[in-house]
Amino acid sequence: MEVVVLGGGLSGMAAALKLSELGHSVVVVEREATLGGLARSFARNGQHYPLGYHHILENDGPLLACMARLGLAEHVRWGNQQMAFHLDGRAHDLSSVGGFLRYPISLRSKLEIVRVAAEAMFKASGQDLSQVDARSWLLARVGIEAADEFFERLTSIRFGHSSELLSAAYFKRRLAKREAVARLGHMPGLDWTHELVSTLEQRLLAQGVEVVKGAAANELLSSGNRVTGINLADGQRSSGDAFINTMPPEQFLQLLSQGDCDSVAGIEYSALYSLVMTTATPTSHRHYWTNVLRPACSFGAVFRLDLLNPTLAPPGMTLLNFATHLVGTKRDEWWGLSDDEVLGRYLDDHTLAFGIRPEVDWFHLERIRYYTPIYRTGYRNPPVRSAKLENLYFAGNYMTFPDVATTGSALMSGERAAMALHASMGGSPA
């Protein structure tokens, strides 16, 4: 059977690899010049850098299993990296007792935060939290001070919107992941995202998968209840017996020439602006991950990528990553800014928050319009198989609720779609 995979991100690559291993003929169509999707990298002076803050989580089982199969796991090194919460000129490391006690909220609120985090990690909820918004859940669990002065500020910078829009089921799952205290992995001397993507691409090619890069799809053709092909922007057409879509739903729905796929309609995404830069200016950053809770800045967090992987930074340089999550009108406003205007905002606000204006050696700005699904209250994963088009399947980070969207969950989503497609054709389990 011939299968066309729309999108060469990690979900698409995982789906294509699994299908080829099961004996199917596969074509991957990717609009960018390189594969990888959100895990893409960029090169500078012979060194590859991640598009932004990509770290290997020690509890990301699917990613670690994939890296082991590809022979990459043996190169991973682990370490404890600190997360800080920056408030009014002071960085608070809440993973330490002293830092937690100095955070400017009442002791009662601090104890409630500890309690709700412990419950998220160790206690199952008897309630269907997907039907509850995160703010209501937090107010009931930790009270108004902790909800407003800590969680609401953190949610706003991490997702670009209020906790009122977020499902409590997803919020609780994020707490359970313990990102603030978990060990993080990297590959010394290498950008691990580049190694993962390039090794997966080599494996695909070795399996006989056809990879078409730099080919934007502009129309999905269908007849009756089946997809028949894809028209590409360069005038070419790709046909197949079955199709797996890994594109964000909003992009995908623009391709339909007739019929609809209401199971993925209405799924919204936040955007991400990620600026990576080097500077020789000494900065005050002593933490890998600094969330800027107050004052409000154009960026929500600053990462010192060289603290996670010192070999990425040129000698004498600090490698910084500014990250901004945007939704709605703010996303549209930022889309009209030039790269230099975005850089200027970041440098101005870095001066405001930290009292230091870094001198820029070089910078790379990435604008990702579809970054993370907005897991609203009541969110449900769409069926892996389309209800309207019987040979169309779905994979991507909008299929992984309530799990935290990670590299591993993207890989797992692609494999799940491949197995569902294979099973629908009477194939035996892998």
Image: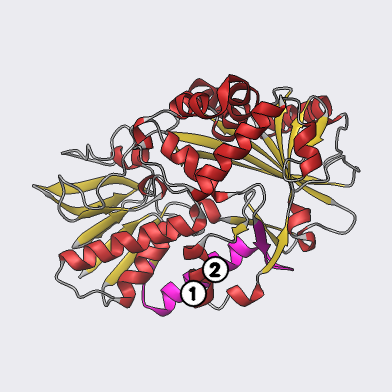
Question: Is residue 92 shown left or right of residue 4?
Answer: right
**What is the three-letter code of the residue carrying label 2?**
Ser
Front-lying residue, 316 or 212: 316
> Outermost residue toward the left?
224
Distance in Å between CA atoms under marks 2 and 1:
6 Å
The boundaries of the magenta stretch are 183-210
Indicate which disc residue 198 carries: 2
Where is residue 257? Give x, y as percent: 20, 40
Asked if the magenta segment contains residue 66, the reply would be: no
Q: Tag 2's secondary structure?
A: helix
| Classed neighbour count for the residue bearing mark 2: other residues with Cα under 10 Å, few (<14), some (14–19), many (≥20) | some
Indicate which disc residue 37 carries: none
**What is the three-letter code of the residue carrying label 1?**
Gln
| Vertical relation: 35 (above or below) 297 | below
Asked if the magenta segment contains residue 204, the reply would be: yes
| Classed neighbour count for the residue bearing mark 1: other residues with Cα under 10 Å, few (<14), some (14–19), many (≥20) | few
Quadrant location, the C terminus: bottom left
Q: Tag 1's secondary structure?
A: helix
Which residue lies at the image location 20% right of the left edge and 70% below the top edge?
1
Residue 20 in view of the camera: yes
